[in-house]
Image: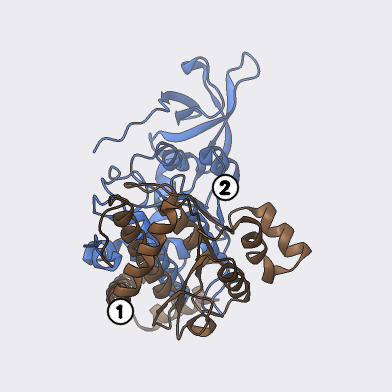
Chain colours: A brown, B blue
Amino acid sequence: MTTHESESTSFLYPFIESEETDAKSLLDDLAASARGKAAESARLQRSSLDEYNDGLTAAGTEMADRFRRGGRLYTFGNGGSSTDAATLASLFSRPARGRPVAAWSLAADEAVVTALGNDVGFELIFKRQIIAHARDRDVAIALSTSGNSADLLTAITEAKQRGLLTIGFAGHDGGQMAVAEDLDFCFTVHSQSIHRIQESHAMLGYRLWSVAQEHMARPRNGARTA
Amino acid sequence: MTITVQPGGSFVGADLSADLAAAALDLARKFHDGATLWVISPQWEPHAHHVAVEFVHPVIMGKRALPSVALVEPDPVAQARVASQPGDLLLAVASADEPAVIDAMRRAQAWGVLTLWIGSGPRPPAGAANHILWIDSDDPMVPATGTFVLLYHLLWELTHVCFEHPGLLKAPADECTEEVCVTCSDEGRLAEVVLEPADATGQALVRTAKGEEWVDVTMLGDVKPNDLVLIHAGAAITRLTSQLEVTS
């Protein structure tokens, strides 16, 4: 079918080289596309870090205070964002350098997730875990490229009620997360691309981690700057 | 003062973008022929899961779902061995010194599996995988800054662009001629032992890129399942050590 088409095409246009040449031009296009998308990814990461510099510093500092009091970090998201949540939790719990703190992804345990999804509904897969695990000194970070995931929003509300520090990573226009009163901090990455948003979420999470690390390394009773 | 890291996008220059393009075309061709993409990341399992969900459930509506599975059991080599079939794909997100990935990438030749390796830091030796997509940075925090995420996002995006060029999805002609050469030449082929000889005839079942076959292993003495051997003209002629250290 397609093979036939391309064969008959090359027969009709003998001066167009074989498919090798066509692949070459496709490969050039692909490489140029990769560079363009990568440049946009880098631009978005930089502008997101700039936009939220103050908020990330404040949130990271508050996280450090909670870790010092024995607080734990729960991260959660759906799909690709659940894997990014897991990467973020690993960054806190087993960093390549610095001090590890207790952190885990609430999507990590398939027994818990499927039990809750099956018995009480998908919308409650994270909220019910917050109810089970959370203490008032803990931290919850929700990642959603739309900012509208119901399972995240209900968990955030529960976390806020229990005294947790609540942080949201959103995308597009921030959706419901951008206006959620239960979020102490909401970092919305302004892009229409889910891929580019996720790449910036990782960078923002990394900044949170570095701020928290820096503050945990300071003497406990020493002077603190905001 | 806050530590800043280099955005992943700044690493994608002429070389890496060309590597990504070539890898994407190979991925698309293999998927077109029915491949499954197996993904391992022993140090950072979430990356393996992210790649799998990316291909299985595309974020852009209308893009086709493609078979991809994260292999995250404690022994990813054993898991990849039993999962993979000739024509499949194996993608690792790992540093160059990750022993299980070094082992899996080498054995993939005997499994008939095309390999891709994403990582940062010291590079794997040339030829360690069919496609090496590498971030040349010694920063140990690279895996947590979205840089690998960017690389596999790009790989996914470019792969789907290739599907818009169906005429280029069939294997290039030189692959066919290569196969003819292997058959008639003196070349040794990598094989992995499946069954050791059951009797004195010295015939062991091995798997190669072309599938399973019985070969004479009397020249090597004892062989065990999972041994890597070179075969030539129906006989195993050399055993390869399973230990492989990264030299960089």
Tag 2 secondary structure: loop
Question: Badge 2, how many Cα within 10 Å: few under 14, some, many 20+?
Answer: some
Q: Chain of mark 2?
A: B
Q: Which residue corresponds to the image point at 54% horizontal and 38% vertical from the top-left?
A: B75
Camera-side residue: A24 or A90? Answer: A90
Camera-side residue: B149 or A190? Answer: A190
Quadrant of residue B14 within the rendered picture = bottom left
Camera-side residue: B188 or B80? Answer: B80
Q: Position of residue A10 (x, y in %)?
A: 39, 78
Q: Position of residue B240 (x, y in %)?
A: 41, 27
Q: How far apart are labels 1 and 2 at the CA level?
A: 48 Å
Name the quadrant of the C terminus of chain B: top left
**Residue bearing mark 1:** A51
Picture layout, residue B68 above or below residue A39: above
Picture layout, residue A66 above or below residue A152: above
Q: Which residue corresponds to the image point at 31% horizontal and 72% vertical from the top-left?
A: A45
Picture layout, residue A30 above or below residue B15: below
Q: Chain of mark 1?
A: A
Q: Position of residue B60 (x, y in %)?
A: 51, 78
Mark 1: which amino acid?
Glu
Position of B208 compared to B115: left or right? right
**Residue bearing mark 2:** B85
Question: Badge 1, how many Cα within 10 Å: few under 14, some, many 20+?
Answer: some
Mark 2: which amino acid?
Gln
- Mark 1 or 2: in front is 1
Residue A166, can we see it?
A: yes
Tag 1 secondary structure: helix
